[in-house]
Image (cartoon, rainbow, N blue to C red):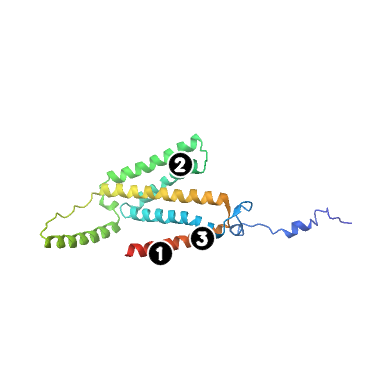
Amino acid sequence: GPTAEDPLLGNEEDHDEEPTTPLAAPLLPSHPESRELSGWKVVYLALPACCDIAGTTLMNVGLLFVAASIYQMTRGALVLFVGLFSVLFLRRHLGLYKWFALFIVVAGVAIVGLAGAIAKDQKAVPSTLAAVHNEMRSQVKAGISILRERRLDPQAPEELPIAVRTVVGVLLIAAAQIFTAAQFVVEENIMEKYSLEPLKAVGWEGIWGFLVTVIGMVILHF
């Protein structure tokens, strides 16, 4: 008759184990053998949330000064900062061909930024910038009228050239990639040391990001 060693029957341990599916992966700890990230340690996830807020804010501000094409290409500098931070803080090792690839990407980003600075086409300036500039000019005129009442006659500030706007926008977007790269590196460092379900990690980062945003909005309002 059949025995317990029969492959058609299997064993009880195999029946007790639940099959892992891609849908269940977000509900399982990333590193079950590591320490669990619980209690006050969830504050660690506030750091990548703050980096995400800072990076997104700088990118949106930079988008006011450049066209969407330049904005999208400048975001390619992210791979350089991720590579540098992974070597400096995570002790990763990048081969020579990887550094060469990073150099090619950064050179392409620099060429795109230079082309945007050299171009004198008004169409390259987004319409949002015009609205912001008009609002700033109205505020400046109001301030000038107040100063004239005090017997001062300042000259109205001239409009910034398109090249200067493009350079400022590219620098802001490039600086935003530093915060985004820091977010990725910090997240990887936390997930390597602690065990936490991916859905919980995303949830906690969302909670911390929401709290920081609300507090920042109240402070900036006043």
Q: Residues within 10 Å of mark 3 (few under 14, many from 20)?
A: some
For residue 214, which numbered disc appears in the image? Answer: 1
Q: Residue at x 30, y 58 (%)?
A: 128
Kind of residue at disc 3: Trp
The secondary element bearing badge 1 is classed as: helix
Residue in front for this viewpoint, 123 or 87: 87
Residue drawn at the location 40% of the way across and 41% of the way down: 106
Q: Residue 5's x, y, as percent?
A: 83, 53
Task: State the residue in front, 62 or 222.
Answer: 222
Q: Which mark is residue 204?
A: 3
Residue at 25 percent of width and 58 percent of height: 133
Residue 26 at what x, y percent from top left? 58, 58
- What is the three-letter code of the residue carrying label 1? Val
In-image side of 52 versus 140 (left or right): right
Left or right: 180 in relation to 1: left
Mark 2 is surrounded, within 10 Å at the Cα level, by few (under 14), some (14 to 19) or many (20 or more) other residues, namely some
117 left or right of 33?
left
Q: Amino acid at mark 2?
A: Leu
Above or below: residue 28 compared with residue 174: below
> Which is nearer the N-term, disc 1 or disc 3?
3
Is the Cβ of the residue at disc 2 closer than 8 Å to that at disc 1? Answer: no
Q: Residue furthest top?
A: 96
Front-most of residues 84 and 1: 84
Residue shown at the point (49%, 48%) measured from the top left: 185
- The front one of 101 and 135 is 135
Residue at numbered disc 2: 84
- The image shows residue 97 at horizontal and vertical percentages of 49, 35
